[in-house]
Image (tube, rainbow, N blue to C red):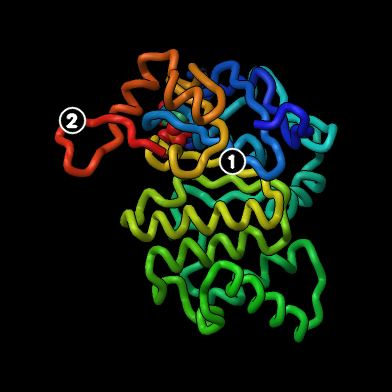
Amino acid sequence: MNPMQDKILEVKNLTLTVRNKTVVRDVSFELFPGQITALVGESGSGKTLTGLSLLRLFPNEAICKNGCIMFANRNIFDLSSEEMRKIRGNRISMVFQEPFTAMNPVMCVGRQISETIEAHQKYLRKDMLKRLVELVELVCLSRDVLSKYPHELSGGMRQRALLAMMIACNPEILILDEPTTALDVSVQKEILELIDTIRKQRNLSVLFITHDFSVVNMIADSVCVMKNGKIVEKGTKKSVLYNSQHEYTRNLIACIPRLGDTRRRLPVG
Ligand SMILES: Nc1ncnc2c1ncn2[C@@H]1O[C@H](COP(=O)(O)OP(=O)(O)OP(=O)(O)O)[C@@H](O)[C@H]1O
Ligand SMILES: [Mg+2]
C-alpha cells in the first residue's frame, strides 16, 4: 500500500444486518488504484455481503445500520438508482461468486459482452466487433469464443470470458468474489496471473474475495481478515502473512498446504 497514493474508495464503519442479525460489523478499509486488496475469511464471515455493498447490491432483507462507502466524493448510499446504474459495470464491476449464474446460458459470449458495453456506451457495429475481439484477446482467448455459449467453454475459459465482460467498460474498481475457487491449481495460477497483468495495465483497483491464504500470498498487496462480520486484522500482505497478530489469521494461514510436507505451514514467496 502506498500511503502517498490517493484512495479510490473508502468503506467506513459499515454495519449491515439481515433479519436483525448483524452480518457485517463496523467494517472499514480503503482501496487504492493499481492495488489488490484481499478480503479473506472463513465461510459466512461476511465477505460477499461486504463486496456487494460496494455496488449496493446486497439482498432485500439486508439493512445498512451504520457507516458509509465513499466513492468519487459521494456516499454510495446517498446515490439515486440512476446514479448507481451508471456506476455498476461501468466504474465498479463485480465477478460474482457463482460464474455459471453470472453468464446467460442461452446467449453467446460475444452478445453478452456487447450487451454489457451497450448498457453504458454507444458503438457502431463494426467498432463493436473490433472492441469484442480486442477484449477476448486481452484475456488470452481466441476470437472464436465470441460465437460460443457458456456451456461450450471450460471453467478457466468461462472465467476469462467473464473477466473480459467485467473490464469491457474500463472500470476503476473490480470486485472478484472467489474467482478461482472452482478451478484446478494450474488454471487458477493462469487466471491469477491474468488478473495481475490487467490491474497493472489499467491501474485497476481490485477487491479480491477469497477464503484461501495461498491465493492471498500469490496476488494481494494488502489484506483484510474477516471473522463473524468483523475485520479482525488488516495490513500489508507481508505484515499479515509473516507477523499476524490474531490467532484466527494464523489458523487460516496454517491451512496452506505444502508439497511434500505433511505438516502445514507458510510457503516462502
Ligand atoms: N440473503 C441472505 N439472507 C439471509 N442471510 C444471509 C443472506 N446472505 C448472506 N446471509 C448471511 O450473512 C452472513 C455472511 O454471508 P456472506 O455470504 O457475506 O459470507 P461469505 O464470507 O461470503 O461466505 P462464503 O465464503 O461461504 O461465500 C452469513 O451468516 C449468511 O448466512
Ligand atoms: Mg461469499
Q: Is residue 13 above or below residue 241?
A: above
Q: Is residue 175 left or right of residue 8?
A: left
The residue beneath circle 2 is 263
Which of the 4 quarters of the picture holds residue 71? top right
Tell me the quarter of the picture where residue 114 sits. bottom right
Please tell me which residue lies in front, 199 or 72.
199
Considering the image in quadrants, where does the C terminus appear?
top left
Q: Nearer the viewer, mark 2 or mark 1?
A: 2
Residue 22 in the figure: left or right of residue 113: left
Q: Residues within 10 Å of mark 1 (few under 14, many from 20)?
A: many
- Disc 2 and disc 1 in contact, CB within 8 angstroms: no
Q: Is residue 214 visible?
A: yes
| Residue type of the residue flagged with mark 2 | Arg
Place residue 264 in its image quadrant: top left
* Residue 227 point in image, percent of width and height: 43, 21
According to the image, label 1 marks what residue?
36
In the image, 70 versus 246, the foreground residue is 246
Q: Residue furthest front?
A: 268
Q: CA distance from mark 2 to mark 1?
A: 29 Å
Quarter of the image with the N terminus is top right
